[in-house]
Image (cartoon, helix red, strand yellow):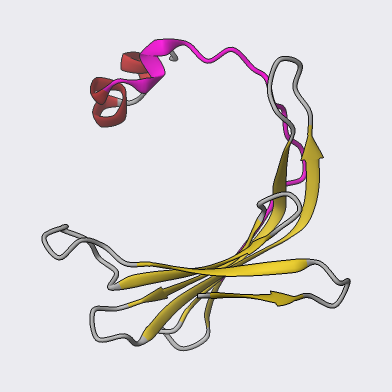
């Protein structure tokens, strides 16, 4: 959709993501703002099938994560989601501690684990 400068002189790209006509999706389109230097997603606007903005997610308080053997990535520690379908509805998520580079057992990524949880995923 376009590019604009941010306050710090950084370039911000705005992308419009539109589903294929036959795709069974909830949203009519998504519009994202992405920072050029590290590809960090700053904002996601969610539109219904009629083109009305119904939800907005903003991301901030970024940290750069470097795990040996992987490319560095930028991760937001704060996410704010405003739901415009419910007046005054806002969800704020703040990550206080985090770990990256952990070994995750493959059985965590099965349909059985998704459906059953708990013991099906190798946890009690």
The residue lying toward the viewer, choosing from 46 and 102, is 46
Where residue 37 appears, as percent x and y from the top left, is 76, 53
Q: Quadrant of residue 36?
A: bottom right
**Is residue 106 left or right of 104 when viewed as pictured?**
left
Q: Residue at x 52, y 15 (%)?
A: 104
Image quadrant for the C terminus?
top left
Where residue 9 appears, as percent x and y from the top left, is 86, 72
User: What residue span does the magenta drawing correspond to?
Assistant: 91-110
**Is residue 91 left or right of 85 when viewed as pictured?**
right
* Residue 79 visible, this angle: yes
Q: Residue at x 35, y 87 (%)?
A: 52
Furthest-front residue in view?
Answer: 2
Where residue 120 appears, as percent x and y from the top left, is 31, 15
Q: Residue at x 80, y 41 (%)?
A: 64
The residue lying toward the viewer, choosing from 96 and 6, is 6
Q: Residue at x 40, y 19 (%)?
A: 108
Question: How many numbered discs sit on the rendered protein?
Answer: 0
Q: Quadrant of residue 23?
A: bottom left
Furthest-right residue in view?
Answer: 8
């Amino acid at each position: 959709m376009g590019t604009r400068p941010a306050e710090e002189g950084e370039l911000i790209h705005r992308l419009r993501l539109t589903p294929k006509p036959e795709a069974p999706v909830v949203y009519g389109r998504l519009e994202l703002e992405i920072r050029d230097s590290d590809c960090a997603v700053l904002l996601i606007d969610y539109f219904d099938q009629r083109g009305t903005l119904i939800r907005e997610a903003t991301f901030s308080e970024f940290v750069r994560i470097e795990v040996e053997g992987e490319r560095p990535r930028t991760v937001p520690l704060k996410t704010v989601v405003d739901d415009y379908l419910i007046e005054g509805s806002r969800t704020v998520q703040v990550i206080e501690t985090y770990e990256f580079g952990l070994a995750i057992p493959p059985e965590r990524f099965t349909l059985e684990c998704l459906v059953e949880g708990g013991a099906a995923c190798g946890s009690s």
